[in-house]
Image: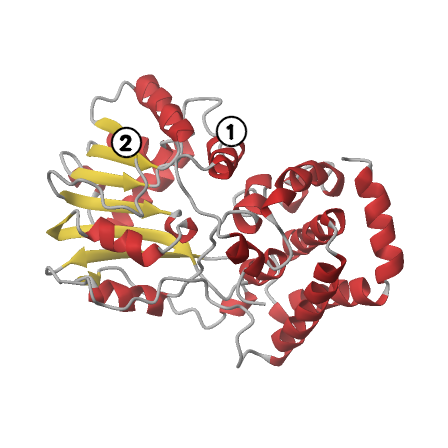
Amino acid sequence: MGLYSMFDKEKMKYSENNEFTKLLYGRNQFQYSVDKIELPVGFIKYHKTNFSNYFKIKKSNFKGRKILETGCGPGKHAVVLSLMGANVTAVDLSLDNIQKGEKLKKFYNLSNLSFIQHDLMKPLDYKNKFDLISSHNWIQHTENPSTVLKNLVSGLKEGGRLYISTYHANTFRFFITQIARTMLKREYYELMYNLVKFHFPTGFKEFNNPDDICLENIFDDFFVPYCHTTTYDIVINDAKKLGLVPITEIPDLKQLYSLDNIPLRIGLEKKEYKDFTKRRFKFTKPVDEFAANLPFFISESIKLSKKTSKYLNKLDDAYINCSFCLGLYRIRAQTCKMDNPKEKHQILQQYLEATLLNSTKSISSIYDTAKMYE
């Protein structure tokens, strides 16, 4: 099977009229995002610093800057940039999210913030180019991230800056994700949503990691139509072809496999215009977490993962596959603060071996219990 093959076969496309996209991002994914309307003080403070660090601009110097905030979701980051004094245009695919953003705008009485519904896989009509463009944690979920980047750079002034935050490959989070996405189908979504209550009856507080281990994270990793992980080398390679150069430090990630998750964040500056219509880009698909030349303990996990995936896909049972994948997520949740990658993979391997060795008994138990939550 290829990367995330179940989803590739279904050829799920994002669009503002796609009902699954509306369900996933417009309603369920961000349904609690603005219930309290007012953003936490800590959230505003953190993201002001984050934007300052990656645009390489003092917080006091955002005033009057023309900024495009892309994939804005319910508008929280757009509000932060507006509170910094920037003139912000916020863009999102989902009309539901745009409406939530308008509520935040009204609450904060912001005249320097406007919202547009648009699919950034298509060029935006740039009447005037932007000083800064923010792409915070969404481009990995588009059909082709390099196409989106080209569309964004087209709207950036020479000397303008682009901030990207996306998913870094080769962490335990996305090893788990790749296993799950080989055996999940879009039509399993509602079942999985209901089964979470069975597998995590007390929620996720016990894992003491609300930013990385939460309900939204399960569906963000397992069910979005596209989940394109990448590396700094890939992003910088594509950036150079777009006339961009890094302006922020690239971290040394030698111990990457010991991490549960780490974001890829980079600030870039547009040095020159380049005709990139015929250039070949690399940020077009997820990094294969099952690639060759990995440490032995990971190679063993790969072998067992492929065997287990093949077995469960042959059974082709929604309850079994969803329950198995929620078990995978529990392993990730329980090991998210472990520093030793070998220990993480040993626990994963024990789970995979148990599924294979005790398949008849364990699968039957999962099935009978899960049916109660239909």
Position above or below: 221 against 34? below
Residue 301 is situated, as x and y percent measured from the top left of the image, at 66, 71
Q: How is the image coloured?
A: secondary structure
Residue in front for this viewpoint, 125 or 344: 125
Which residue, given by chain and number where applicable, does mark 1 sit on?
A: 31
- Quick one: label 2 or label 1, which is nearer the N terminus? 1
Foreground mark, 2 or 1? 2
Residue sitting at x 61%, y 50%: 185
Q: Is residue 209 visible?
A: no
Real-space Cα separation, disc 2 to disc 1, in angstroms: 20 Å
- 10 Å crowding of disc 1: few (<14), some (14-19), many (20+): some
Q: Is residue 23 visible?
A: yes
- 10 Å crowding of disc 2: few (<14), some (14-19), many (20+): some
- Left or right: 328 as drawn, with respect to 220: right
Residue sitting at x 55%, y 40%: 216
Element marked by disc 2: strand
In the displayed orientation, state which residue is furthest to the front.
10
Which residue, given by chain and number where applicable, does mark 2 sit on?
A: 116
